[in-house]
Amino acid sequence: MKTVAHNTAFLTGASIIQKALSFLYFIVLSRAFGASGIGAYTYALSFTTIFAIIVDGGVTPVLIREIAAHPAAAAHTLRRALQCKAILFFLALLAMLSVGFFLDAARTLWPLIAIAGVVMTFDSLNLTLYGVLRGFHTVQLESLGLLVAQTIAIIFGLCAVVFHAPIAIAIIGLGAASITNSLLSGRAVFKMLRTITQPVISKLTIKEFIREAIPFGLAGAFARGYSYLDALIIGEQVSVAAVGLYSIANKLTFAFQFVPLALSASLYPAFAKELSERTHETPEKLRGLWNNAQRYVIFVGTGIVVGLVVLAKNLLHLYGNSFGEAHIVLTILALSLVASFISYPTGALLNAAKLQHLQTTAMGVTFAINAILNLLLIPRVGIVGAACAAWIGNMCLASVGAYYAHQRVVKLPWVSFTKNLMIAVCAGICGAFVLYGLRVILPWMIAGIGGIIMYAALLIVFGGVSTAECKGLFARLLRI
């Protein structure tokens, strides 16, 4: 358990730093290249990212599991994984060429897509190599690799800005970062495999490897499709500049996904422990864990929503004056954030109960509804339609997942959940009015800090958080 906590701390810390650097870097790019340049950049990466899931095909999770269980067979398992990925790579390339032929935006931006395709190839290789290291419970190099890759990408991007080069240089920077990462991870894997003195042959054939990977691949495909399909439809039905406007609002909103992700990382083993022991107290403990997790994501998520909605125009102007018109999109996406957060504890509960196929089903249903809504709404109302589709999709994912968990795992405490949601809504509405008033008389960043303090105070007033919990939180912070 100490190793898990140690590794989680490494990866979480590196991810937070990487996201902070990426956030600042994207502001610089947006101000330099405007909506059209960022739209082209986002479209090319979105196009290749969708097909990147075919290249991985769920192979990496199987690789990690097999190496963790049979480390002596690591070399043979890696060979099997690379053989599978070679087959999947050609399938992905064929799919990219076939789909790109029918999309006007893809044909126009094919040089950027070609460069992004190289990035996709090396990213997939990195995923495999770091999967080997994860199988050996080693993530320090992966954490370093995140930061090194982000630094290289930033250097190339800044060069493009300073020397007024095309946006393609920024994508080339991502490719250089991926290649560097491949060299780092490949060297580490080579050293790791040389330490195995008595290697054995894995029993998994290529056919079995692919069969084991299919459920993971489907889940990844639904998640990627749900996250990136809207950008392709916007580029095709509206314009590449509209992709840029939508992508900024989307990035601002979902930059906060690390909140439920960090919670799920600790919640999943807690659920798994309770389900494995199976005492008469297990249902009540599961309900308590789920309810406390939901209370956390609802309260934190609502506070983030208030800040994003009230300060939408100020935040968008950080990226340049041309992005101000995306404030309606940012508002709608922000309102969908709480539903997105709510789905994470439920997903952790289903996975811990070994019902991951139901979580995959929920993701599949959500992806289908989201895709249909995007196809219907984007041609009619543009990027606002994409935001509405995302909002409905997040509601669907939270609802379907909760239904499965309630029916198949444990009866969920809906009364407590509804009470927490109502407290958050009341505190959020009052906090929004306070923040709006502060924004009129104070600089918006200072007003934002004041709004956070006021929202926290309102949670205490409405009974969402007790003073004892606040004292305990301050005590833990002082011990850090």
Image (tube, helix red, strand yellow):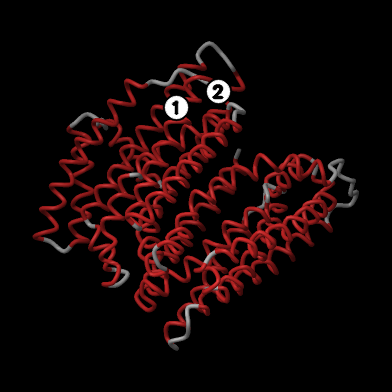
Quadrant of the rendered image containing residue 416 = top left
Disc 2 crowd rating (10 Å Cα; few below 14, some 14-19, many 20+) is: some
Q: Which of marks 2 and 1 is nearer the N terminus?
A: 2
Residue 198 in percent (x, y) is at: 91, 49
Evaluate if marks 2 and 1 touch, with contact meaning CB atoms under 8 Å apart.
yes
Q: Which amino acid does label 1 sit on?
A: Leu
Residue at image x 53%, y 21%? 409
Quadrant of the rendered image containing residue 189 = bottom right
Front residue of this view, candidates 72 and 237: 237
List the residue tagged with mark 1: 289
Q: Is the residue 403 above or below the residue 284 in the image?
A: below
Residue at image x 45%, y 65%? 22
Horizontally, is 9 left or right of 30 in the view?
Answer: right
Front residue of this view, candidates 134 and 318: 318
Labelled disc at residue 274: 2
Residue 215 in percent (x, y) is at: 66, 39
**SS at mark 1 in the image:** helix
Q: What residue type is labelled 2?
A: Glu
Horizontally, is 428 left or right of 300 in the view?
Answer: left
Horizontally, is 283 left or right of 250 in the view?
Answer: right
Horizontally, is 386 left or right of 4 in the view?
Answer: left
Quadrant of the rendered image containing residue 128 = bottom right
Front residue of this view, candidates 423 and 234: 234
The residues bearing labels 2 and 1 have C-alpha atoms spaced at a distance of 10 Å
Q: Is the residue 397 above or below the residue 84 in the image?
A: above
**SS at mark 2 in the image:** helix
Labelled disc at residue 327: none
Residue 192 in percent (x, y) is at: 78, 57
Residue 172 in percent (x, y) is at: 57, 76
Quadrant containing the N terminus in the rendered view: top right
| Residue at the top extreme, as displayed | 280
